[in-house]
């Protein structure tokens, strides 16, 4: 995620983390993919999740912007749209 995106997001605790259970087959696939590019599993999963999150935010903002009437007040823009417009 670019630094400019992080500045617009709420601060998090230093000890924030995400934990989830996955099967042996799933971790094997992820581990092999991470190894192929020389990354740790953590770096690979985090990068992949952030890529997907940014894509989903962009698609949501584009859909909201497309559905908004042309005479919409720019100050009332959806926060996701405003964030993405600021990045472009």
Image: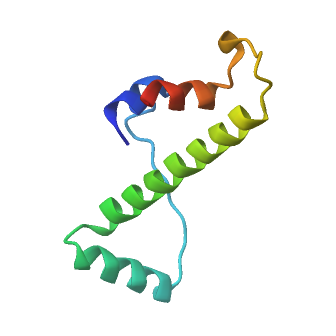
Horizontal side of 62 relative to 2 (left or right) equals: right
Q: Quadrant of the C terminus?
A: top left
55 relative to 7 in the view: left or right: right
Q: Residue at x 80, y 24 (%)?
A: 69
Residue 71: x %, y % from top left: 77, 15
User: Relative to 55, is 75 above or below?
Assistant: above
- Note whether 16 is above or below 20 in the view shown: above
Q: Residue furthest front?
A: 70
Query: Exactly how many numbered labels are in the figure?
Result: 0
Q: Position of residue 40 (x, y in %)?
A: 26, 67
Residue 27 appears in the picture as rendered: yes
Task: Tell which of 87 and 35 is nearer to you.
Answer: 87
Is residue 11 among the parts visible in the rendering? no
> How is the structure coloured here?
rainbow
Residue 82 vs 36, above or below: the answer is: above
Viewer-closest of 80 and 69:
69
Residue 52's x, y, as percent? 51, 56
| Furthest residue toward left | 38
Residue pictured at 52% horizontal, 27% vertical: 85
- Write the residue at 47% across / 87% down: 24
Quadrant in which the N terminus appears: top left
The foreground one among 20 and 68 is: 68
Q: Residue 29 at x, y = what percent?
A: 41, 84
Establish if 40 lies above or below 31.
above
Which of 36/45 is in front?
Answer: 36
Query: Is residue 31 found left or right of 79 in the rendered image?
Result: left
The residue drawn where x is 33% and y is 78% is: 33
Q: Residue furthest bottom?
A: 25
């Amino acid at each position: 995620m670019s630094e400019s995106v992080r500045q617009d997001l709420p601060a998090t605790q230093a000890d924030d983390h995400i934990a989830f259970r996955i099967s042996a087959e799933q971790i094997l696939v992820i581990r092999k993919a991470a190894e192929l590019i020389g990354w740790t599993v953590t770096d690979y999963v985090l990068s992949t999740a952030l890529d997907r999150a940014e894509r989903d935010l962009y698609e949501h903002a584009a859909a909201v912007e497309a559905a908004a009437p042309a005479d919409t007040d720019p100050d009332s823009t959806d926060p996701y749209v405003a964030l993405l417009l600021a990045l472009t």
